[in-house]
Image (cartoon, rainbow, N blue to C red):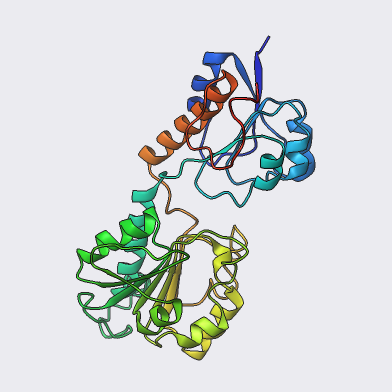
Amino acid sequence: MSTFRVLITDYAWPDLTIERDVLKEIGAEIVLPDSTSESDLVRAATGVDAILTNWAQTSAKVIAAAPKCRIVSRMGIGLDNIDLDYCTSHGIPVTNVPDYCVLEVAEHTLALLLALGRNVAHYHWRTKAGEYRLQDGPPLRRLQGQTLGIIGLGQIGQAVAERARGFGFNILATGRTPKTLPGASWVELDELLERSDYVSLHCPLTPATRHLIGQEQFSKMKSTAFLINTARGGVIDHEALSVALEKGEIAGAALDVQDPEPAPVGEAPYCHPRVLVTPHAAFVSEESLADLRFRSATQVKARLTGEIPECVVNEVDLAGSF
């Protein structure tokens, strides 16, 4: 008979080999829901000792179905799919892997930037269609000397800045708290939008940042500027983005994250010829996923065996909760 039961709400990889290998060391049984609907998650969560969650909405109702729950471990960085307030008020620690996929997202951001700046997607599709015409594309500018504005200078934003400097970009940055980074100038959001040739989003999705980039912000950007989002889809007002593209207020966009997901790719702005779309792929590499899965499962293992897990994000009494 299993010592513990652990709900895994959802996962974005082919199997659960890594999670099973870690949790079997403490005799834990993995519980899977029939779907990620709240009702199915509630049924699956009933009586479990821990919850591992990837993207599924782990609401107060889901967590409340598990009165013995000792930990909610996010298999990722962001916490917007977890009712953090409920967990804190009930003494349940919530963990994440804050340095997960930093390099991957930074690399993907630069890949999207280069694809926009060098007309890669435009030339690719036209050439594959038999139109081998160098002149059949938007004007190209040398990247060196252009300005990259980074909104959110956390670990990923800093990694993007470090790599972009290698291409000769001038770096502007803004965010909730002013930070100092060699080679980057901290400015207010409006100034960043007005001066940047590329604007890259690296902020979390919170009530304060939802639709941070909307009609007013697009009107401040250069008509030749590009917007890149590898953060969260809800940071952009996509309806306003569609309008801005049609009016020529910006030159284009690259969206690895959308709102909703999966994105309705046949609709604006995703179907616009000057918009690149990738399927929330920035975080992926074999190395990053293996590390994420092992560390998330190990956090659960540590908590269930009376140890303090790494990366607890909320203030709870860990020592007195056993």
Front one among 265 and 65:
65
Which residue is depicted at the point 58% across and 49% down?
79
Q: Position of residue 11 (x, y in %)?
A: 57, 39
| Residue 304 position (above or below residue 113) | above
Q: Name the side, left or right, on which 86 lies relative to 133.
A: right
Residue 41 shows in this picture: no
Quick check: 171 left or right of 50?
A: left
> Picture coordinates of residue 7 (x, y %)?
66, 30
The residue positioned 56% from the left and 78% from the top of the image is 214
Quadrant of res 121: bottom left
- In the depicted structure, whether residue 132 falls above or below residue 234: below
Q: Nearer the viewer, residue 198 or 95?
A: 95
Query: For the image shown, how many numbered marks are present on the structure?
Result: 0
Outermost residue, top side: 1
Q: Residue at x 56, y 60 (%)?
A: 205
Position of residue 163 relative to residue 293, above or below, is below
Q: Quadrant of the N terminus?
A: top right
Q: Is residue 138 visible?
A: yes
At 65% from the left and 18% from the top, the residue drawn is 4
Please provide percent x and percent y for residue 236.
55, 71
Q: Is residue 20 above or below residue 158?
A: above
Which quadrant would the C terminus be assigned to in this image?
top right
Where residue 172 appears, as percent x and y from the top left, is: 33, 73
Question: Dividing the picture into quarters, in which one does residue 264 lie?
Answer: bottom right
Task: Give 69 or 271, whichever is nearer the viewer.
Answer: 69
Residue that extends furthest to the bottom in the rendered view of this protein: 247
